[in-house]
Structures are given as structure tokens and as C-alpha cells.
Amino acid sequence: MAEEKKKGITINKDTVNGLMETIRNLYLADDIPWVIGYSGGKDSTATLQLVWLALQELSVLELHKPVHIINTDTLVENPAISSWVQKSFKIMNQASNAKGLPFVTHRLTPPADNSFWTNFLGKGYPFPRKKFRWCTDRLKIQPVNNFIQDKIAEHGEIILVLGTRKAESSNRARTMAYYEKQRVRELLSPNPSLANELVFSPLAEWTDDDVWIFLMQYANPWGFSNNELLTLYRGATADNECPLMVEKDLPSCGKSRFGCWVCTMVEQDKSMEAMIINDEEKAWMSPLLEFRNEFGDDKHDRERRSFRRMKGNLQGSYDRLYHGPYKKEWREKWLRRLLEIQKDINENGPKEYENLELITIPELRTIRRIWVNEKHEFDDSLPLIYKEVMGKEFDDPDWISSESFGKAEWEILEEVTKELEPDETQAFEMLYSLIDVENKASSLNDRKGLLVDLERTIKQNFYKDENDALNYYRNKNNRKKDYGGTYDEKFAAEYVKSSSLHPYLYDTEEGNLNDY
């Protein structure tokens, strides 16, 4: 039977001093480097502060191994929190260098080709949801694991110090208790996902009140203000901070105080809403909240997406097709809106955000290549959208434009197609894709397999519209069933409507990105 969650204050000065002594002994016990996860929230701040206060009592000779402080910046963090963390890192570096301490900060980010905007606006992945949570692994887990694996390769082993606490939730308490039983040495638990990584959780038994009492009674050793941190928390709701994500099956940080501003894992971003309501100086974030609610509108999401999967194939359930990536018009619309918000914040927001990038130039370059090279959209609309919104040319020095086809040819083709086939919704996409496939096969080597590519393009687009595609897939599936072949049983099954089931969720993807 799980222990009842502890509440109130359970620590005192002797408890804290004893824990600091434990930290010093653990640090001196071996040459294994430490990595501390820092989100900028109360738990990670308290953890780092404990370690910092403990180690600053050691002599220079005893400080024999580095302590890496890592923060995972998803590139879509709440701007106020991201700014807080960056300021913290700057002060930490100055204080550590001045006092000869072993702390080294690292800002970890997803690569441009795997960021939120690249996947969402570039590839057209549907916004993350419970059955299709593609964001956490890409934006948080992979950057952390890559860093840790590099350190393990360099040193053979590392100790990861986290601010996780049993009082956070009953699930967290059970998980921590489970791995405590598997400890390979005192205080160090194995990481379930990475070999040669040991986890140390100094705040494991602390309550929320313990954390705040410690932060308020012990001055921040690197010179930042814990009172400002308290003010930051008072400005939002009573959720937990976003933890350092190291496991895919951990609860989403979507309900956390310090999460991504684009998070659609919850219906409302209560923390940002509260910040805006409680602090007039944060009213500039309102457009971010509105934009997140706009693209995260589940009621209208289906109509914004293609009735085919990313690879052009059909798939569905209960006599209804799954919808795949977002259509061109929506990807372009949302990119324009994102840039408009960014420009407005730069020009009219607080001075500290005059250079804020809601989407980075490397991400924009990657999105451009996906649209033109993978989706065959040779009108190359991204630079034009950027110039119209930002008022300057898009910087992409490595880009090689097509000499044969561009925006003018695109518009002519679109006009002619609408005139000749006004009711054929897929005709234009078929034609521009065929033209682009042929155009890219300019050299003799590139023409190998050209006929296969052209045939595949035709098969992906030969439907008149979604109803035509649905009838085609239904008839094909029925023939397989009638002749004893392997057919899509889920598609052929009868859907029974339920008042408890959201009408837009029964055809939601189940996280198989290979279908996109």
C-alpha cells in the first residue's frame, strides 16, 4: 500500500546540513561527472542550490570533477521562462568562474530538422494530442539523451541529479520507489532507459512546503533572486514545474507551470493565462495564447488536413478515412501568423524581447526545403511570406532555385487546372507534383526510377475528392474481404456512436509516424 503523501514542512536546518554533507561525500566518492537537470522552476532550482551550497565548502583540490547543468530548451518554451533560464545561466557562469567552482551550463535544443515548427509547419504533423504525442521525445528526451550519451562515451559513466520528488504525484512516488529497490549503490538508482547512467534525487522525500522554505531561507548562491522566482510562481496557477524529461512514459509536462507555449496536451494553457491576467507587463503574450488555441482547435482540425497520409496512402477506421498532414494553405497561413506575432513582439513588446525568435532562421530554411523538395510545392512560398511580413529578404545563401519552374509557372498551372477541372480537388496537386518530379530528374542518374515515381504520384492523386477516395478504399477493402484476403477489419467495423466519445477523436492517429 502506497504511503500517504506527506504534506507541510518536514525539514529543518539539521536536515539540510546533513543532506549537504551527503552530497559532498557522494561527490568525493569517485571520478564520475555529474549532470544536473535545470528547468528554472522551484524543484530544479532547489536541487541545484543544494549541490552548489554543498560543493562551495570544498577546497579547490577537492573539486576534481565537473558538474554539468543542463536545460532543455524546446525552442517553443514560454518566453518569460526561457528568458529567466537564460539570465540564470549567465549569472551562474559568472559566479562559477569567479569562485573556481566546477559548474558548467549547457543549453540543449532539438536540431532544426526535428523541431516543433519543422514537424508541424514543415511536414504537417497534426498538433500533439494524447494518442499522437510526437513532441516530447523529439523536443526534450532526445536532446538530453544525446548529451548524456556523449558524456558516457567520454567518461564511461555519469550521475544524473534530478529534482524529482515523491510528493509530486502518486505515480512519481511509485516509480521512484521501484527504482530505489534496484539501486546499485547507496542513493544512486539506475536509469531505465540509458545504461551507465545513475540517478540521484536529493529532494526525493521533500514536500512542496519544504522546497519553498529552503528557497526562502537560504540565499541563492549564484546571486539570482529566489524572491523573483516566488513572484513568478504567484503569477500562475498551482501546477507542478515541467520536469527534465528522460523517459517517454512519464506524464506529459503539458500540465506543468513551465511548459511549451504551443502545448496542446491540455485544453487550456492555464499558466500562461494566469501570467497574462495577473501581470499587465505580460499582456504581450496574449497573441501566443490565441495562436495556440487557434491551431489547437480540435473541432476544426480534420477539415484542415489531407484525407491521405504523408506518403499518399489511404487508411481509416469505421468506414471513415484517417486524415493526415495539414494542407498547404494552412501551413502557409500559420507560418505567416507566427511571423506576424514575432514581429509585433519585437517592435512593441518589452525591450528584452526585441530580438525574440519564435521560429529560427535554420528552422525556416528546413521548412522551405521540405515544402519544395518533399512536397513538390515549387512556388517556393516561404521566402515571399517572410519578406511580406518581416519587410526584408529571407537569408538562405545555400539555396539553389529551379531555373525552370517557380511562382509564375505555379500560378499559370493552377489557373488552367481550375478552368479545365473545377470539380477535381486533386488534379492540381497531381499536376504540380508530376512536373516537379520530372524537373528534379534532370541528370541521367536521377532519371533512374523516374517512371516508378511518376506512377506513385498518379496513384496518390487520382481521386476526384475525399468521397471518391473513401468509396475507392471501401470497395477495395470489401473485395479483399469477399475473396478471403487480408483486409482492414477496423475500417470495415461498424462505428457505434457514444455520448462519452468526442466525435473527432475516434479517427485520431495512434502515434505511428511511419504513416506520415
Image: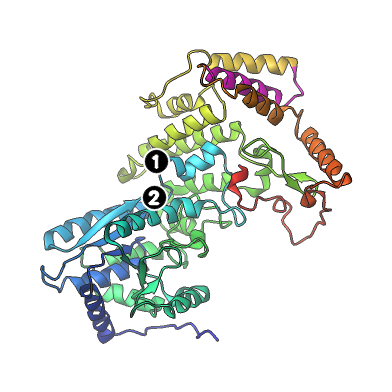
Q: Residue 317 at what x, y percent from top left? A: 76, 49
**Residue in front for this viewpoint, 497 or 104:** 104
Amino acid found under the numbered disc labelled 1: Ile
Q: In the displayed structure, does residue 315 sit left or right of residue 229?
A: right
How many numbered markers are drawn?
2
Dot 2: few (<14), some (14–19), or many (≥20) neighbours within 10 Å?
some
Q: Using the numbered discs, state the Cα–Cα distance from disc 2 to disc 1 in whole angstroms.
A: 11 Å
Instruction: Name the element at disc 1.
Output: helix
Q: Which mark is residue 345?
A: 1
Residue shown at 36%/38% (left/top)?
346
Which residues fall within the magenta stretch? 421-442
Magenta segment main secondary structure: helix
Residue that carries the numbered disc 2 in the rendered image: 79
Q: Does the magenta run of residues contain 435?
A: yes
Q: Nearer the viewer, residue 301 or 474?
A: 474
The relative height of residue 491 versus residue 174 in the rendered view (above or below) is above
Res 152 label: none
Q: Nearer the viewer, residue 170 or 113?
A: 113
Contact? badges 2 and 1 (CB < 8 Å): yes
Q: Viewed as shown, does residue 361 lie left or right of 492?
A: left
Q: From the viewer's perspective, is residue 195 above or below residue 302?
A: below
Could you tell me the amino acid type at mark 2?
Pro
